[in-house]
Image (cartoon, rainbow, N blue to C red):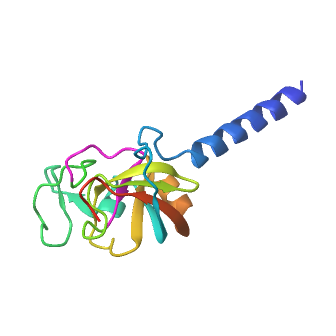
Amino acid sequence: MIAVPRRLARLVLVAALLVAAGAGCSRFRPPKKVTPVQRTMTTTGYCKCRKCCGWRRTWYGRAVYAYGPNKGKHKRVGVTASGTKAKPGTIAADPARYPFGTIMYVPGYGYGRVEDRGSAIQGEHIDLFFKSHAEALAWGTQKKEVAVWFPRGSP
């Protein structure tokens, strides 16, 4: 009877490691026959919560921006700057360097596509979307060699 709980614990641990290793989305694939550009980037994690995305609720429950140029204006929670719903594989980047639609491969996260931006995301810094705040915090800040495929017509 004791071997079963240990085996179950091992299976749960392996499943958790596989989920953490494949947090990105396999739906995004790079273009075929195109060599990626390799960049060393600072990567951080974010989710759709108030702390990560800078929003708050008004006294009557409406989500609004907590600070910045849009302070007090309506905020669509979980919706990216490009208008898509944030999900694993969504990446926030500096749009001056990485336009929306840029596909990236981040080791330990997986494939993702740039669909969001943030005021603190500038230069060689990207923010990776996670389903929960705990996952985003667990990712922390990491330097990674990232493979980048720009959309057609971009540098």
Q: Nearer the viewer, residue 1 or 111?
A: 111
Q: Which residues make up the magenta segment? A: 82-93
Give the image location of residue 106, x and y in percent: 51, 57
Residue positioned most to the front: 33
Q: Which one is in front, 6 or 118?
A: 118
Quadrant of the image containing the N terminus: top right
Magenta-colored stretch includes residue 87: yes
Find residue 134 and report its horizontal and vertical position in percent: 51, 54
Q: Residue at x 33, y 64 (%)?
A: 93
Q: Residue 88 vs residue 72: left or right? A: right
- The residue at the point 32 percent across, 46 percent down is 86
Residue 37 counted in the magenta span: no
x 89%, y 29%: residue: 3
> In the rendered view of the protein, which quadrant contains the C terminus?
bottom left
Q: Is residue 2 above or below residue 86?
A: above
Q: Is residue 13 above or below residue 91?
A: above
Instruction: Please indicate whether residue 65 sits to the left or right of residue 27 in the image.
Output: left
Horizontal and vertical percent position of residue 79: 24, 48
Residue at the left extreme, as displayed: 73
